[in-house]
Amino acid sequence: MNIPEGYDPRAFEPFAVTVDLAVLTVRADRLHALLVQRGQEPYAGSWALPGGFVLPRESAGTAARRELAEETGLSGATVAGLHLEQLRTYTEPDRDPRMRVVSVAYTALVPDLPEPRGGGDAAEARWLPYDEVPPLAFDHGRILADARERVGAKLEYTCLATAFCPPEFTLGELRQVYETVWGVPLDRPNFRRKVLTTPGFVEAVEGPPRRTGGRGKPAALYRAGGATALHPPLLRPEGRTA
């Protein structure tokens, strides 16, 4: 490609592009976020969201999947099957003390995974309950809060809650996702009716295996269906926010 006559790229200050990942899961009936402890300056020793610089021949999406695989220890093929969506772009000039850095943030929703491993310059990686997250480096606290708000809203009109569940799950486990993210108990019969009467929300797993539900009663297993949207939406109780 020819450079247009009169165009001087040196007239523009260079800047870096990073990806930051707000990785959320439900563990022990609590919403957890994947955090890394920074091993290098700036903010050495502080907790932050996993992420890193976009390499010269990478797209932001490719970099996000690479970073997610590195921090969780999952294979690239497994990561490709997880829910990963672009959240927004953060462009404040002074958000990174090293230089001008633009971050393309992503939200990843995952089922309960094993303990993570620190990758790159991270000294440690850990799942922490969302309500116990300490002050984060850079503007990562804002990114994490934005991700929580986005997920809470999308649970109302999409089938996104199944992304928190294992391949086969009970309706009780699915309901727990909503209750955990929204922070409010739901009426069990109404929830069950809503899920089972929404075409494509879930599909029953025929025959065994079955697992034990509350009070020792057997509970039927389901898997995510082919639908992506809820019509009508499953609205959270009034006055509640994610």
Image (spheres, rainbow, N blue to C red):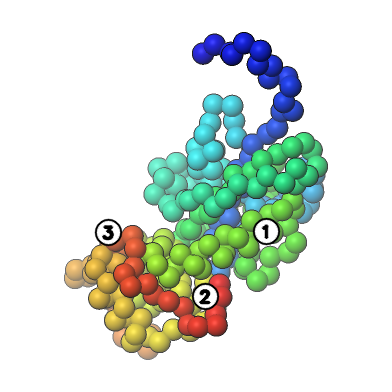
Under mark 1, the amino acid is: Arg
Do labels 1 and 2 touch, CB within 8 Å? no
Figure label count: 3
User: Residue drawn 43% across and 76% down?
Assistant: 235
Would you call the spot at circle 1 few (<14 residues within 10 Å), some (14-19), or many (20 or more)? few
Real-space Cα distance between discs 3 and 2?
24 Å
Under mark 2, the amino acid is: Trp
> Of circles 3 and 1, which is in front?
1
Badge 2 is on which residue?
182
Badge 3 is on which residue?
226
* Label of residue 142 in the image: 1
Q: Quadrant of the C terminus?
A: bottom right
Quick one: SS at disc 2? helix
Would you call the spot at circle 3 few (<14 residues within 10 Å), some (14-19), or many (20 or more)? few
Give 228 or 24, whichever is nearer the viewer.
Answer: 228
User: Residue drawn 34% across and 63% down?
Assistant: 229
N-terminal of the pair, mark 3 or mark 2, is 2
* Label of residue 54 in the image: none
Q: Where 234 sits versus 120, above or below?
A: below
Under mark 3, the amino acid is: Gly
Q: Where 116 sits versus 222, above or below?
A: above
Q: Where 218 sits versus 53, above or below?
A: below
* Quarter of the rendering containing residue 241: bottom right
User: Residue drawn 74% across and 22% down?
Assistant: 11
The answer to whether 181 appears left or right of 167 in the picture is: right
- Looking at the picture, how far across and down is residue 15, in whole percent? 70, 32
Do labels 3 and 1 touch, CB within 8 Å? no
The answer to whether 228 appears left or right of 70 in the picture is: left
Q: Residue furthest left?
A: 207
